[in-house]
Amino acid sequence: AIRFAYILGAPIVNTAEGIKPGWMTDEDAFRIMKYNLDTILKMAENYDITLTIEPHGVYTTNAEGLLKIMSLSDSDKLAINFDTGNIAIAGNDSVETLKAVIGHVVHVHLKDVKREQATEGHETGVTAGMAIGDGNVDIAGCLDILRQHNYDGCLSIECSGVEAMRKSIDFLKGIIE
């Protein structure tokens, strides 16, 4: 993926921590992540590609886990692709989590969800299907945090369907200056 991104001129490759087997300890998981990150980041540095970690699992959908992963390497090519909806689906506060990790964020997925409508076992990374502004994620609060920290990266809208996209854009136009 890193070579392909380089060929395409894409500056970022996005990933997540993957599924943690029930038998694996947290200590083992972070040791394996460190080994993998060390290996992958050498290639990323060679190609001048940033590897972003997106909230998708037990370690990345909370500030503590994201910060621990960021501490596994001192490479400036390791960063966070923050997903507002995935944080909320995991039961965490998107604004508070973003505040804690903002120094590592280089890309943002704006996704709105209604936690009470998520089915039991709903996995992060699955499009929630609603327009930005129709869920209970504090999108305006997240945008305020980004603004306060002079974020100048991409904002990617995640929703299902053309109508939801139109509604999302209209909502965002009302709060982005």
Image: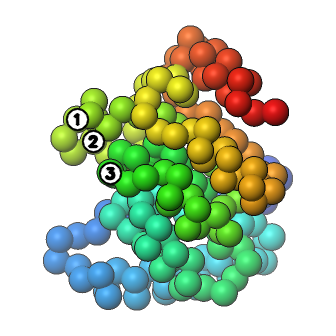
Q: CA distance from mark 1 to mark 3?
A: 13 Å
Residue 97 is situated, as x and y percent measured from the top left of the image, at: 50, 60
Give the quadrant of residue 60.
Answer: bottom left
- Do labels 2 and 1 touch, CB within 8 Å? yes
Q: Which residue is mark 2?
A: 122
Given residues 85 and 37, the one toward you in this image is 85
- Write the residue at 60% across / 16% down: 167
For mark 1, what is the residue?
119
Question: Please, what secondary structure does the residue beneath circle 2 have?
Answer: loop
- Say which amino acid is labelled 1: Thr
Separation of disc 3 and disc 2 at Cα?
Answer: 11 Å
Nearer-N-terminus badge (3/2):
3
Label 3 is placed on what type of residue?
A: Gly
Screen quadrant of the C terminus:
top right
Q: Nearer the viewer, residue 46 or 70?
A: 70
The quarter of the picture where residue 21 lies is: bottom left
Q: Which mark is residue 29?
A: none
Note whether residue 131 is visible. yes
Quadrant position of the N terminus in the picture: bottom right
Measured along the vertical axis of the image, is residue 7 above or below residue 36?
A: above
Q: CA distance from mark 2 to mark 1?
A: 5 Å
Q: Residue at x 73, y 24 (%)?
A: 173
What residue is shown with label 3?
91
Q: 118 or 46: nearer the eye? A: 118
Horizontal placement of 145 versus 176: left or right? Answer: left
50 left or right of 70 in image: right
| Point 32% across, 88% down: residue | 27
Residue 110 visible here: no
Q: Secondary structure at mark 3?
A: loop
Label pair 1/3, CB-CB below 8 angstroms: no
Mark toward the start of the polypeptide (1 vs 3): 3
